[in-house]
Amino acid sequence: MMITELMDQDDFRARLQAWGLEGANRQTLAECSDRLSEALAGPEREPWQQRLASLLAKRELLHPEVQALLDACMK
C-alpha cells in the first residue's frame, strides 16, 4: 500500500483548531507546540493526551515535523 496523503502542518493546525485550541490555524507549528504544552499541563490534560495519542497511533500518516512535535509534547 502506498501512502499518498500525509497529515501536514496545515492539517494538524486545523485539527487542533477543531479540538478547541483557539487560533491554532493561524499559528506556527512552534506556537502550537507551546500551546499544546500548556494544554497538557492544565486541567484538560487527559482529553488532550487522548487526542494526541490518537494521532500518534497513525504515525505513518504524519508529516515528519508533525510527528516530531507530537513526540516532544507527549514525553
Image (cartoon, helix red, strand yellow):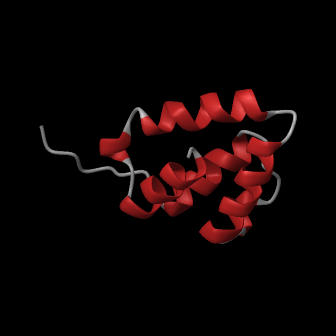
Q: Residue furthest right?
A: 43
Q: Residue furthest left?
A: 1
Residue 68: % across, % down: 45, 58
Query: Which residue is at a point 80% across and 52% down the rendered structure image?
Result: 38
Query: Which residue is at a point 73% across and 58% down the rendered structure image?
Result: 24
Lateral position of residue 73 relative to residue 46, left or right: left
Query: Which residue is at a point 66% across and 60% down the rendered structure image?
Result: 33
When the figure is inspected, residue 41 is found, relative to residue 8, above or below; the finding is: above
When the figure is inspected, residue 53 is found, relative to residue 63, above or below; the finding is: above
Residue 2: % across, % down: 14, 44
Lateral position of residue 55 relative to residue 1, left or right: right
- Counting labels gives 0
Residue 64: % across, % down: 37, 60
When the figure is inspected, residue 7 is found, relative to residue 52, above or below; the finding is: below
Q: Residue furthest front?
A: 75
Query: Which residue is at a point 43% across and 51% down the rendered structure image?
Result: 7
Quarter location, residue 60:
top left
Viewport quadrant of the N terminus:
top left
Lateral position of residue 37 relative to residue 30, left or right: right
Quarter location, residue 43:
top right
Residue 62: % across, % down: 39, 50
